[in-house]
Image: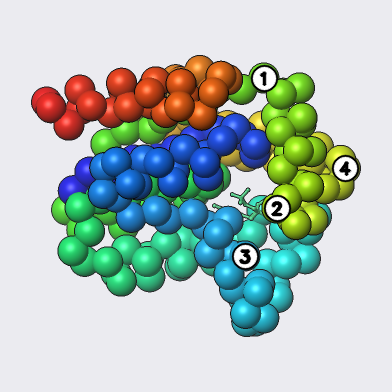
Amino acid sequence: MFNLVLFGPPGSGKGTQSEKLIEKYGLIHLSTGDLLRKEMKAGTPLGNEAKSLIEKGQLVPDEVVVGMISSALDANPEAKGFLFDGFPRTIAQAEALDKLLTLKKTAIHAVLFLMVNEEELINRLVGRAKTSGRLDDADPEIQRKRQEVYKNETLPVAGYYQNQDKVSRVEGEGTIDEIFDRICSHINPLLEA
Ligand code: AMP
């Protein structure tokens, strides 16, 4: 198995790049944001609970997202590998993920960290709000909250993986294809090794 984490702040292009990466490398895309939006749309109790937090720019509890990821791993026993997008977002989630993968006799092989400056992030989210229909993109207050939550709770996750020597920093500005090529240039040598 080959498992990747695509890491970066809200608006750094994780969703866009994930689509291209899963196609090229045959991985299963696990986006906790997408899974939560699906639950919200279906109006499940989990979705309703998540909605109020997401619309405030806050994180959903660790147990909820770890549970969703655990079910998704179990549901795909034949997977060549997984691409984690928007997960893990806290150290507790990263530790839980390591445990789940160890049980499956696998691990995270690389963490691709998309680097984008804050002004560009806000511009992208404002642009995305026009088409995504996402309330958490449209409101500048919520966007600021999401960037703050990212800095306080999620950025330490990069340090967690840095300690495992797994982080590759990728310049996340430029065209979609330029950024994709940069990401692939980090992944390909790992697959050849
Ligand atoms: P995203 O689509 O990844 O930007 O996620 C949208 C929102 O879903 C986030 O702002 C959080 O409220 C929630 N969310 C997504 N993934 C996670 C996660 N791993 N942990 C906690 N909350 C999450």
> How many C-alpha atoms fall within 10 Å of the one at disc 4: few (<14), some, or many (≥20)?
few
Query: Nearer the observer, disc 1 or disc 2?
Result: 2
Real-space CA distance between mark 4 and mark 2, rounded to the nearest whole angstrom: 17 Å
> How many C-alpha atoms fall within 10 Å of the one at disc 3: few (<14), some, or many (≥20)?
some
Query: Residue 141's mark?
Result: 4
> Which tag, 3 or 4, sits closer to the chain's start?
3
- Where is residue 176 drawn, in percent x and y? 51, 29
- Residue 159 visible in the current orientation: no
> Which tag, 4 or 2, sits closer to the chain's start?
2
Real-space CA distance between mark 3 and mark 2, rounded to the nearest whole angstrom: 12 Å
**Is ligand 1 closer than 8 angstroms to the Cβ of mark 3?**
yes
Query: Residue at label 1?
Result: 117
Q: Is residue 24 left or right of residue 123?
A: left
Real-space CA distance between mark 1 and mark 4, rounded to the nearest whole angstrom: 18 Å
> Which tag, 1 or 4, sits closer to the chain's start?
1
Query: Residue 37's mark?
Result: 3
Q: Nearer the viewer, residue 159 or 25?
A: 25
Query: Residue at label 2?
Result: 132
Question: Which residue occupies 22% across, 58% down?
Answer: 79
> How many C-alpha atoms fall within 10 Å of the one at disc 1: few (<14), some, or many (≥20)?
few
Real-space CA distance between mark 1 and mark 2, rounded to the nearest whole angstrom: 21 Å
Amino acid tagged 2? Ser
Amino acid tagged 3? Arg
Q: Nearer the viewer, residue 10 or 107?
A: 10
- Where is residue 164 drawn, in percent x and y? 32, 29
